[in-house]
Image (tube, rainbow, N blue to C red):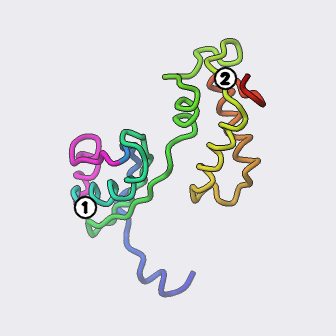
Amino acid sequence: MAAKEILTRRPVAATIKLTVPAGGARPAPPVGPALGQYRLNLMAFCKDFNARTQKYKPETPMAVSITAFKDNTFEFTVKSPSVTWYLKKAAGIESGSGRPGHVTASTLSLKHVYEIAKVKQNDHYLQNMSLEAITKSIIGTANSMGIQIVRNLD
């Protein structure tokens, strides 16, 4: 670590994790109470978040991690929607199987899984993983939801 980095580090008050609809951040619950207790500027967060998530369809659930500093400032990172959300949308179902492995909720092709993997590869925490590894992880998630993965849909 450089000495300059240590000097410029600000004390962190809290790390807040929320799931907010894309383009739908408002100073009402759940955003308002979560940020208000740390005296953060709600409107600044809402405007920045809505601007960053403009490219996604409205009502897409976005995971956001907000770092609140003791001087009432904040930084936040927005992650793409969860793999389970993408799988449910691609399969056209509301929820996964109640008994995965016994009851199949839906069927998806490998092409769908590959497309989801390409989208998830842009997340900063998955950038160092190969596309094949991300695809295998998504297949595992699909199996645990009761979604069967096949080579081609007939």
40 is higher (above) or lower (below) than 84:
below
Q: How far is mark 1 from mark 2, CA to CA?
A: 42 Å
Quickly name the residue at label 2. 107
Residue 149, percent from left and from top? 72, 28
Q: Nearer the viewer, mark 1 or mark 2?
A: 2
Q: Nearer the viewer, residue 115 or 52?
A: 115
Q: Residues within 10 Å of mark 1 (few under 14, many from 20)?
A: few
Q: Give the amino acid type for the residue marked by disc 2 in the picture.
A: Thr
Identify the residue shown where x is 44% and y is 47%. 63
Residue 141, percent from left and from top? 65, 33
Q: On the rendered image, what quadrant is the N terminus found in?
A: bottom right
Identify the residue shown where x is 64% and y is 50%. 118
Q: Is residue 22 left or right of residue 152?
A: left
Q: On the rendered image, what quadrant is the C terminus found in?
A: top right
Question: Image quarter for residue 11?
Answer: bottom left
- Whichever of callouts 1 and 2 sits on the residue coming sooner in the sequence is 1
Q: Nearer the viewer, residue 83 or 68?
A: 83
Rendered image: mark on residue 147: none
Identify the residue shown where x is 66% and y is 12%. 103
Q: Main secondary structure of the magenta part?
A: loop
Q: Is residue 110 left or right of residue 14?
A: right
Quickly name the residue at label 1. 44
Q: Give the amino acid type for the residue marked by disc 1 in the picture.
A: Ala
32 is higher (above) or lower (below) than 92:
below
Residue 6, percent from left and from top? 47, 81
Q: Which residues are magenta?
A: 23-41
**Helix, strand or loop status at disc 1:** helix
Numbered disc total: 2
Question: Image quarter for residue 83?
Answer: top right
